[in-house]
Image: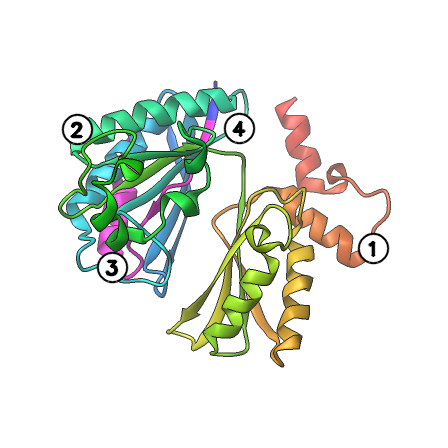
Amino acid sequence: MKLVQCVPNFSEGRRPEVIAAILDAIKGVEGVTLLDHKPDVDHNRVVVTFVGDASVVAEAAFRATAKAAELINMETHRGEHPRMGATDVIPFVPLTGATMEDCVQIAEALGERIARELAIPVYLYEKAAKKPERRNLADVRRGEYEGLKLDINKEERHPDFGPARLHRSAGATVVGARPPLVAFNVNLASGDVKIARAIAKAVRESSGGLPAVKGLGLMLEATGQAQISMNMVDFTVTGLHTVFEAIKLEAAKHGVTVASSEVIGLLPAKAMLDVAAHYLQLTDFNQEQVLELKLAARHEG
């Protein structure tokens, strides 16, 4: 088996019945295991995680994309998180027995099918990108749905697959292949989104901050808190504890504190073990000292 993880993001976090329909589409594919889904009301977005053999994950992603196109209208969608389509992004991640090239091939085939059968323009990103300027998701999603609606007819914004026009309700979709990442948010004890944006700029790599960190400042209306929303694209380069401490320091400069943090979706055990080892100042610690991981390793062997 070539085990592949798929982590699609859908532009719906407020209507449980729509989310349930999308999840049912995924669960209807034999051989696919739904692991997690995390809706967010303020972001108006749900992150879904499922795994399966390379031969079936694309089918589940396609069915979910078709269902989202049927039920989500981007003309009326509003949310804090950047987005450009009903199914905003579909990354494939290689797990046991699978390679990055396997995931690139899956992404290319799925992108072509979505464009052909659903008339949704598709952009390829990260390891599947056909153009270097499309490797970074933020660059592909520049201007979001509203901006792309105006610019998609320009040659530099033409999709990799499908028509150079947005789907009438589903917008556009980004499909790609990437290593595991951690979606990590830090909430401030403040409602000042300008502070969150300043902190995000200070910690993200593109602004001269921490390597392998992407981030932006958002406002959570439901809680009245400002948030630094991040993608940790390689937690072995910059760990969660490193960025958390950096945010605390930056927040202190603005006279505010950190209220809480959250992980969206799933993450590798090592990411949390690194945090524990750092704060406990453990020496010579390795994951085989974690009982459940040791048992799982012996079972796999």
Eye-nearest disc, 3 or 2: 2
Task: Find numbered disc 2 in the image and state the secondary structure of the residue it sits on.
Answer: helix
- Nearer the observer: mark 2 or 4; the answer is 2
Local packing at callout 4 (Cα closer than 10 Å; few below 14, some 14-19, many 20+) is some
Q: Which label is found at residue 15?
A: 3
Q: Can you say which quadrant of the picture contains the C terminus?
A: top right
Q: Which mark is residue 95?
A: 4
Residue located at (59% from left, 51% from top) = 205
Q: Residue at x 31, y 22 (%)?
A: 109
Disc 4 + disc 1, Cβ < 8 Å: no
Q: Amino acid at mark 3?
A: Arg
Query: Mark 1 highlights which residue?
Result: 281
Q: Are marks 3 and 2 in contact (CB under 8 Å)?
A: no
Q: Tell me which amino acid carries mark 1.
A: Gln
Residue of label 2: 117
Disc 2 versus disc 4: distance between alpha carbons? 28 Å
- Which of these two is toward me, 70 or 111? 111
Mark 2 vs mark 1, foreground winner is 2
Q: Is tag 4's residue or tag 1's residue first in the polypeptide sequence?
A: 4
The circle drawn on residue 180 is none
For marks 4 and 1, give the CA distance. 30 Å
Q: Horizontal placement of 265 versus 159: left or right?
A: right
Q: Over which residues does the magenta segment extend?
A: 4-29
Spatial separation of the CA atoms under disc 2 and disc 1: 54 Å
Q: Which residue of the protein is positioned furthest toward the front in this rendering?
A: 155
